[in-house]
Amino acid sequence: MVFRSLESEDLFHFCARYSHHTMNHFAIRIEQILILLLSIALLLSHWHTLKAKIRKLRQVLKVYRPRKWKPRSPSDCPSCKSGISLAILKPNSDVVPYAQRKSTRGRKKGLSTQGHACPNPNCDYFGITDQRIHALVGDGKRGIRKHIQYWKCQGCNKRFTSRLHTPLYYLKSDEGHIILSLMLLAEGCDISVLVRCSKHCEATITRWLERAGKHSSLLHNRFFRDLVLTFVQMDELYCRVRQTGKMWVWLAIDPVTKILPSLHLGHRKNVDAMAFTHDLKLRLKSDCIPAFTTDGLRGYFYAITAHFGHWFRPERARTDHWQVSENLLYGQLVKRPKRGASKFAIMRMLWGQRKDLNVILKLYGFASIIQTAFIERVNLTIRGGVAPLMRKTWSLAQNPEHLLLHVEWWRSYYHFIRPHESLSVLIPGLRKHRQRSPAQAANLTNRLWSVEEVLKLPLAPAFS
């Protein structure tokens, strides 16, 4: 082997270069460590601000991220499983009109008995409200002031009061006091104010309100069925109840006619969204599939996709599969609040095409945007009409049942009695407008009702 020997001068230069390279490398390492430590210290000093910005960025990315929610089916709805429906007992339609059975002699009927029916289940005319068919005639007036009309069924000789199946049944108070109190309760007046201004105690006025609420629920079930709606907005309204704490009132509105087809009182969970949408589905025609717009609550997506579709069985499948309807259009308006105010909003389509929704909106003169302005305006209206729903008030409902009956009575007042300013139409040839109610706009009635007419309308529970 041949070994190469290094001279002293070459060895000196080699060591000098090696030591210089090592020192430079060590200095660079020290500089990098110092920069890293300074960066960490800077991040720690601004950690709270950076954390807020990261959270905001995650929210924005979450909004713009495509939805991956899985549609549900009726098997996920408790109301569909329990078989809740609006089925009613229909009266006998094959009976011969009493005018053809009785003799043509005698005095003709002088009082209108339309809307009243014989309450005797063994009578052939049981439950028939048409005065051209049933056998009701007047049977005099009774009571302390002799103002309560009585009826008599000529088919079974059953006598009963005209107040049967009305909120006024078996009440001895003056009708004027009852009508005025209920009208003020639907205009936002508190029960405590009526107690101070009238001679009636709180329990009496509460009993009137409960009766009016139950009667209003039957009235809603009679008129609001087989509806054909093109566009529906839904939202939930926050409220507080003394016994249960915070709750939500779920509302749906048709922006065209301004009717409120469905409402629900409960919590802000998927079960409540299912029950609320199930009630709306029962009031629509079987082939009616409206377009929906809501806020960003996920429960709406699950409830809407579970009720608007059909079952089918694919090839080589052992069970039926749920298919959401292709005609369904559903958009959400996602609001991101900051310190109580809405900072920005994102519009997104969860089912269907945006252009198809724009066609429906332009058809009725609405802006081509996904919005919930109409249902938000109804939230303000109901807060002004129901005292327990007002903000920062001592007028809280004692229990959910009482609050629900109060809202039911307000809804009947809103639909049939109170005219809606946006629904007024110009009278041809005159410079005047004819006021209309939401029930008139939906062709459910042809006139404005009074509180007395609503309270005196008989509604049997089995035939409502």
Image (spheres, rainbow, N blue to C red):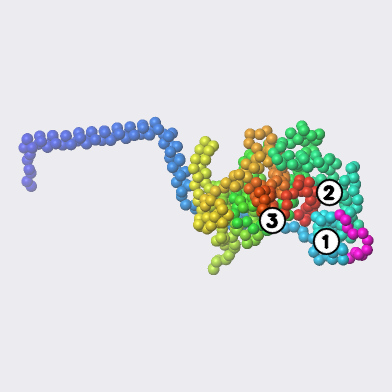
Residue named by callout 2: 163
Q: Residue at x 85, y 50 (%)?
A: 162
Q: Magenta segment range? A: 101-111
Q: Residue at x 88, y 51 (%)?
A: 150
Left or right: residue 186 compared with residue 52: right
Q: Position of residue 253 (x, y in %)?
A: 63, 50
Left or right: residue 381 compared with residue 27: right
Q: Main secondary structure of the magenta part?
A: loop
* Mark 1 residue element: loop
As displayed, is residue 156 above or below residue 53?
below
Q: Residues within 10 Å of mark 3 (few under 14, many from 20)?
A: few
Residue named by callout 1: 132
- Amino acid found under the numbered disc labelled 3: Asn
Quadrant, the C terminus: bottom right
- Which of the two labelled residues, at mark 3 and mark 1, occupies the earlier sequence position? 1
Q: Residues within 10 Å of mark 2 (few under 14, many from 20)?
A: some
As displayed, is residue 21 above or below residue 111?
above
Q: Position of residue 4 (x, y in %)?
A: 7, 43
Q: Position of residue 52 (x, y in %)?
A: 45, 37
